[in-house]
Amino acid sequence: MNCYLGIDIGSISTKGVVIDDNDNIIESLYIWTEGNPVNAVKKLVSNLKDKIPSGYVVHGIGTTGSARKLIGLMLGANVVKNEITAHAVGTLSINPNVHTILE
């Protein structure tokens, strides 16, 4: 089955989520970046990989956050977006009538 990995890599924390074709969350994880985004993402991906049920294959990767470009390059991401765009797309996918988002 297909799944997709999203990573938000910031200076303080790193978040990851794996979703299926129907946008159901298969697994998620929140860890501290500890000043080293590369090591944080290695840890995050390893932990998520261990938790994903067998039979799932990652077909796409998206990154956002302050280290989105570095991590996107490292993982061969299909999508690299800034946080504002990620907030907008995520919010509109849940509620298309939203006109304002406050961060």
Image: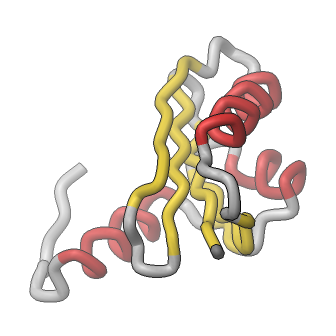
Residue at the far top: name it.
34
Expressed as whole percent of the image width and height from the top left, the position of residue 96 reads 18, 87
Residue at the image position 55 percent from the left and 18 percent from the top? 32
Give above or below for 60 relative to 93.
Answer: above
Horizontally, residue 101 falls left or right of residue 32, namely left
Residue 34 image offset from top left, x and y in percent: 64, 12
Q: How many marks?
A: 0
Residue 81, image quadrant: bottom right
Of residues 20 and 8, the one drawn nearer to the viewer in this rendering = 20
Q: What residue lies at 19% left-to-right and 64% top-to-bottom?
A: 101
Does 9 appear above or below 90? above
Question: Foreground: 24 or 34?
Answer: 24
Q: Which picture quadrant has residue 1?
A: bottom right
Position of residue 59 measured from the top left corner of the image (x, y, whole percent): 73, 73
Q: Quadrant of residue 97?
A: bottom left
- Image colouring: secondary structure
**Residue nearest the observer in this picture, 63 or 29:** 29
As drawn, is 43 to the left or to the right of 102?
Answer: right
Q: Residue at x 72, y 65 (%)?
A: 58
Which residue extends farthest front? 54
